[in-house]
Image (cartoon, rainbow, N blue to C red):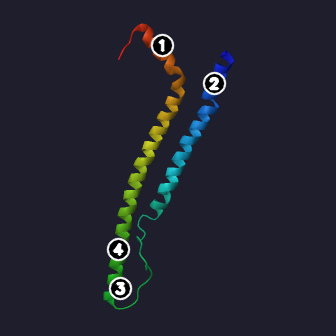
Amino acid sequence: MIMLFMGLIRWWYSDGWLRRARIVSAKLDSSLDYFSMGLLVKTLFSPFRQISAGRTDGPIGVQLRAFADKLISRLIGAIVRICILLVGAIVIVFQVLIGFLILVFWAAIPILPLIGLVMAIIGVTF
């Protein structure tokens, strides 16, 4: 019986903890890939869903209109990308915090019954 308990404790603090850490890491990698933070920063001022972003020839009025269209498209693109960057950063920070808490609680779970037993013996109630 004691060998079974020791085997469980050995697994819990070695392979079990490493598996839990890999799951937390995979979820964080998935979020980083989902939000594509690096790509959003690189293309921050790129036109947003603009069909024609090439050079425009013609009278000055047509060129000014094309310039204004490109400028507005880039401004909208920057606003949308900044919003996505902010939301992504918030999600990733929360995932890091929750992942850290999961790993800490994973380490504490086997100790909690002992803490409860000690608290019951000394008479602590909630």
**Mark 2 crowd level (few <14, some 14–19, many ≥20, 10 Å Cα):** some
Type of the residue with mark 4: Leu
Residue at 45% x, 39% y is 97
Q: Which mark lies nearer to you, 3 or 1? A: 1
Q: Mark 2 highlights which residue?
A: 8
In whole angstroms, how far apart are the C-alphas of marks 1 and 2? 20 Å
Position of residue 34 in the picture relative to residue 66 (left or right): right
Q: Which mark is residue 63?
A: 3
Type of the residue with mark 2: Leu
Picture quadrant of residue 69 = bottom left
Of all residues, the one furthest to the bottom in this rendering is 59
**Mark 1 crowd level (few <14, some 14–19, many ≥20, 10 Å Cα):** few
Picture quadrant of residue 59 = bottom left
Of labels 4 and 1, earlier in sequence is 4
Of labels 1 and 2, earlier in sequence is 2
Element at badge 1? helix
Disc 3 to disc 2: CB gap under 8 Å: no
Type of the residue with mark 3: Gln
In whole angstroms, how far apart are the C-alphas of marks 3 and 2? 73 Å
Disc 3 to disc 1: CB gap under 8 Å: no
Residue 91, image x and y in percent? 42, 48
Residue 42, above or below 11: below
Of labels 4 and 2, earlier in sequence is 2
Position of residue 89 in the picture relative to residue 111 (left or right): left
